[in-house]
Amino acid sequence: MRYHSIPPSKKLSDFIRYFWVLESESPYTHHSMADVCPELLFHYRGRFDEIFEGGITEKSFISGIHGQCCQTRKFQINRSFGIFGVYFYPHAIPLVFDVPTVEFTGEMVSLDTWSRNWGSMLESRVMEAANNAERIKILSDFVVGRLARHHSPKRPVFQAINDIIHCQPQTNVKQLAANYCLSERQFERQFQQFAGMPPKLFCRITRFHWAMSYYGGRKIKLTDIAAECGYYDQSHFIHDFKRFSGCHPRQFFTGDTDATSWRD
């Protein structure tokens, strides 16, 4: 299993968190967890099946958006594969794709379903690219071109979204609104529009990702992770972790689940 991420150019760093690549020559089961950031995905080698309850399977798209979500999903492939992803900040979605971020919440949408005028061409170029460096160039140029159509200044809520992701998240919406000089009602409305979910849920999922970042590091107790990530207590931490990952944190941090195989 080979996974690596690549930072975007400085010009795109407010809209793209990073590009990433996951490749393997072996069969693989992927556990998709709750996330506040949407991804544009291209399966340039192989195609996954999504596994539903009762063992029912359905072919995933070849390329498309995996929207921000609060639930888990499971995918499987029985051959070698290669995936290229663009990990966006959520407020980039309406600026790049002309679709409110909230429309992608909890959804997986094929590129050709909602972008027939340019989606097929973009998919073909990415699939036919000689390597991942070329894919980054194609997608960077695409995003720059789409952003160039907008001339409005950055909104304070964009910075709020960025700060919550990169700083220790807090769930006091009134204080968050005040931090960015917005009324609580303005903040909640704009946040829902550009983040795709309410600020409290966004902060909870972000805090869950902060907790996951301790995986593979020094030996640390669950109580310590809970305290360092701002949970009220260990039971609160376990409840949220199980909801957003589908497994107990003890399983996750000991590697006793295939949900961590791409990290190892």
Image (spheres, rainbow, N blue to C red):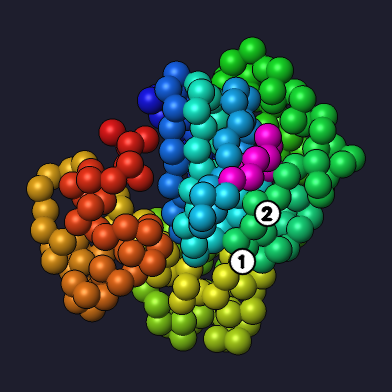
In the visual, does 233 lie left or right of 133? left
Q: Residue at x 33, y 41 (%)?
A: 258
- Res 156 visible: no
Image coordinates for residue 175, horizontal then vertical, percent: 43, 82
Image coordinates for residue 240, horizontal then vertical, percent: 34, 69
Image coordinates for residue 21, horizontal then vertical, percent: 49, 29
Q: Is residue 58 above or below residue 2?
A: below
> Which region of the structure is painted magenta?
57-64
- Between 14 and 64, which is closer to the camera in this rendering? 64
Image coordinates for residue 61, horizontal then vertical, percent: 68, 40
Residue type at mark 2: give it. Ile
Residue 93, numbered label: 2
Q: Residue at x 51, y 80 (%)?
A: 177
Q: Which residue is mark 1?
A: 196
Name the quadrant containing residue 169. bottom left
Name the quadrant containing residue 5. top left
In the visual, does 97 lie left or right of 205? right
Residue type at mark 1: give it. Gly
